[in-house]
Image (cartoon, coloured by chain):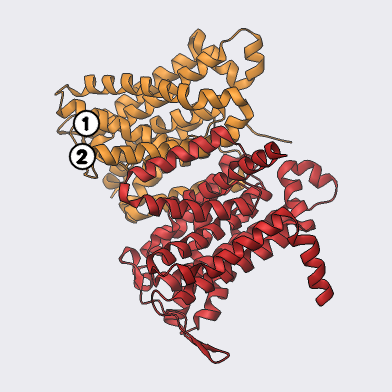
Chain colours: A orange, B red
């Protein structure tokens, strides 16, 4: 029994790492621009497709195909920012805040159906790392382990980038006070574009590493966006640490519920947790507390 | 009575807005005489249902400023309640649609609870989305009663009745559904119009714009939010219940996020906080997207582009474009 519980816990932790990676992009986009990105799931979907095609069509190994996914998704994010968010920012920054949901919903519709049109509704999946490893007599699929390691590495890398570099300081400055940062000579436009690129790249890589579990199909984005919002709200919007801790909480909860009650109850339990948390702490676990 | 009617005609109909409304309603009433195709009638009924849902959603998000992402919860709850009552307890559909609406509005009060303290729109969106998702899972897993994803079928249609010697029957594809739906939509809209133009509507707008200021002049913010959720639940629930007895089959997908995003999209494209915009946007987008069915999936891509273009051109949706046009003609 304890062995089983241990295996659920291990699965939960590994899944939680990936959930954290899914959510970081969502959280940072909100923290910096106030954009609630409903096309986040489609970024994930595109990442999954790019990884799949570079594994099968190009025959790259998994690390290189993830790298390629990251690069292409970074470019994609920049294009999205230039075409979509940039014109709205020019109208007014507050308007971007208000219209972001609608705007990204439109984008998500376009991307989802474009994917359906060009790649069809089939489910596609590929192994990134085959085989299993045994920990404390609990066997774990290597692909999950690989996903967890990549997530943690990217999480640490991103955290270092935000906290230790000059650009990261600029990012934090904008999060605290956009106008103040602008007055200090920070080129906010450039940072915004960069952040959309990073967010898209991280999410795309998340789609790639979860390819063996979530697979690639046009509407695959619906599930990660569920998870992403759950995690981000639980942890507090705009907080990177909150996204990672929230990821682990939601990951462990869903691993246990799907093992003990059945996978259908996964979303029920995670959403019930969030609603309970919001009743007690309306700003999430690590979000900035507001008092008007 | 006659004086009152004359007064209404003089003050309301002679304005441009009143005139356009009258013309639109008249067209809607005589439409089935010219359009015989049951398929188009079906699309129109769906358009009315979703237009009504978008207007009902507009009360909550456009007027009271509570950005919900779970309008499908009220729609689905009304539909399932009415369907289950009429299947298992033999309640007449004419009664059960009201019971469905009532349960949806009571659920609205529960849904309001986590939203009272939430200030940022993303948080209320997630809380309400979560509730809709929880309902979806419950109705999908409650297989003995709802048959889960196999779909609840055999929902009784509205029984036929005699109206001054004319038998009105509700067979599949009959035009009486059209008039029933139209009347339901118009009653709903009239009620909502009265509400938003009363002091309650002013309270909604006040808490939307600045809840602290509203509180300081003695508006009970929590009670107003409860009220907004209640009205939203009632009006969405009754349309959902009608939908159940019209389609006569339900799956838990009525709770899904795609239904919510549809309603949400109609509301924003039409113009939030205008009530009439969302209805028209709902009806027209459903009509257009059916008309574009020949081009297949591309139509959804086009609608996506339409949403983005409307957002970029006019912050207040189609109503905003209308206002701009009116101004430029003056």
Q: Is residue A118 above or below residue A273?
A: above
Q: Position of residue A199 (x, y in %)?
A: 43, 25
Q: Position of residue B10 (x, y in %)?
A: 80, 63
The residue at 68%/42% (across/down) is B326
Identify the element where label 1 is drawn: helix
Identify the element where label 2 is drawn: loop
Residue that badge 1 annotates: A52
Q: Is residue B108 left or right of residue A256?
A: right
Query: Mark 1 Cα within 10 Å, few/some/many (few <14, many 20+)?
Result: many
**Residue A38 in view:** no
Name the foreground residue: A210 vs A259.
A210
Q: Position of residue B253 (x, y in %)?
A: 39, 58
Mark-to-mark CA distance, 2 and 1:
8 Å
**Residue A36 in view:** yes
Name the foreground residue: B244 vs B277.
B277
Q: Total label count?
A: 2
Q: Which mark is residue A124?
A: 2
The residue at 52%/45% (across/down) is B126
| Host chain of mark 1 | A
Q: In the rendered view of the protein, which quadrant contains the C terminus of chain B? A: top right
Q: Are marks 2 and 1 on the same chain?
A: yes
Q: Is residue A173 above or below residue A31?
A: above
Of the two numbered discs 2 and 1 on the same chain, state the one appearing first in sequence.
Answer: 1
Q: In the rendered view of the protein, which quadrant contains the N terminus of chain B? A: bottom right
Q: Which mark is residue B51?
A: none
The answer to the question of whether label 2 and label 1 lie on touching residues, with beta carbons closer than 8 A, is yes
Q: Position of residue A2 (x, y in %)?
A: 30, 46
Query: Mark 2 Cα within 10 Å, few/some/many (few <14, many 20+)?
Result: some
């Amino acid at each position: 029994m304890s062995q089983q519980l241990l295996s659920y816990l291990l699965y939960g932790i590994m899944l939680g790492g990936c959930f954290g990676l899914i959510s970081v992009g969502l959280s940072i986009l909100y923290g910096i621009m106030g954009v609630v990105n409903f096309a986040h799931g489609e970024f994930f979907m595109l990442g999954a497709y790019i990884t799949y095609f570079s594994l099968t069509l190009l025959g790259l190994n998994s690390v290189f195909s993830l790298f390629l996914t990251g690069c292409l998704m970074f470019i994609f994010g920049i294009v999205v920012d230039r075409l979509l968010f940039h014109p709205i920012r020019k109208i007014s920054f507050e308007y971007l805040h208000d219209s972001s949901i609608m705007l990204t919903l439109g984008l998500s519709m376009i991307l989802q159906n474009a994917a359906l049109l060009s790649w069809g509704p089939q489910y596609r999946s590929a192994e990134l790392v085959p085989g299993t490893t045994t920990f404390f007599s609990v066997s774990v699929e290597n692909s999950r382990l690989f996903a967890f390691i990549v997530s943690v590495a990217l999480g640490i890398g991103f955290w270092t980038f935000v906290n230790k570099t000059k650009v990261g300081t600029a990012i934090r400055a904008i999060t605290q006070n956009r106008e103040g940062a602008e007055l200090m000579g920070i080129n906010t436009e450039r940072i915004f574009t960069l952040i959309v690129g990073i967010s898209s790249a991280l999410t795309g890589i998340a789609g790639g590493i979860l390819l063996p579990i979530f697979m690639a199909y046009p509407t695959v984005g619906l599930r990660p966006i569920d998870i992403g919002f759950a995690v981000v709200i639980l942890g507090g919007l705009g907080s990177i640490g909150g996204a990672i801790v929230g990821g682990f909480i939601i990951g462990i909860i869903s691993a246990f519920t799907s093992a003990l009650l059945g996978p259908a109850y996964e979303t029920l339990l995670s959403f019930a947790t969030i609603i309970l948390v919001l009743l007690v702490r309306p700003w999430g676990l690590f979000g900035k507390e507001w008092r008007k | 009575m006659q004086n009152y009617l004359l007064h209404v005609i003089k003050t309301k109909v002679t304005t441009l807005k009143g005139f356009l409304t009258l013309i639109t309603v008249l067209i809607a009433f005589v439409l089935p005489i010219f359009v015989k195709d049951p398929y188009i009638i079906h699309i129109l009924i769906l358009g009315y249902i979703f237009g009504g849902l978008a207007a009902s959603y507009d009360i909550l998000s456009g007027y009271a400023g509570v950005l919900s992402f779970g309008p499908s919860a009220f729609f689905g709850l009304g539909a399932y309640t009415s369907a289950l009552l009429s299947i298992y307890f033999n309640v007449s559909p004419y009664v059960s649609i009201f019971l469905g609406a009532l349960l949806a509005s009571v659920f609205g009060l529960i849904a309001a609870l986590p939203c009272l303290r939430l200030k940022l729109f993303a948080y209320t969106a997630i809380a309400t989305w979560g509730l809709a998702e929880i309902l979806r899972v419950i109705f999908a897993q409650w297989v003995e009663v709802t048959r889960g994803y196999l779909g609840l079928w055999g929902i009784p249609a509205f029984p036929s009745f005699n109206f001054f010697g004319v038998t009105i029957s509700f067979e599949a594809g009959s035009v009486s559904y059209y008039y029933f739906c139209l009347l339901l939509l118009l009653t709903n809209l009239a009620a909502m119009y009265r509400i938003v133009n009363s002091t309650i509507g002013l309270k909604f707008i006040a808490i939307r714009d600045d809840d602290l200021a509203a509180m300081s002049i003695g508006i009970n913010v929590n009670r107003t939010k409860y009220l907004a959720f209640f009205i939203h639940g009632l009006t969405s629930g009754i349309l959902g219940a009608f939908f159940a007895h019209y389609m006569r089959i339900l799956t838990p997908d009525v709770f899904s996020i795609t239904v919510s995003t549809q309603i949400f999209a109609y509301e924003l494209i039409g113009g939030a906080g205008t009530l009439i915009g969302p209805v028209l946007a709902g009806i027209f987008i459903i009509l257009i997207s059916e008309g574009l069915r020949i081009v297949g999936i591309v139509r959804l891509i086009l609608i996506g582009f339409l949403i983005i273009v409307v957002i970029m051109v006019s912050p207040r949706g189609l109503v905003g474009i209308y206002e701009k046009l009116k101004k430029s003609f003056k």
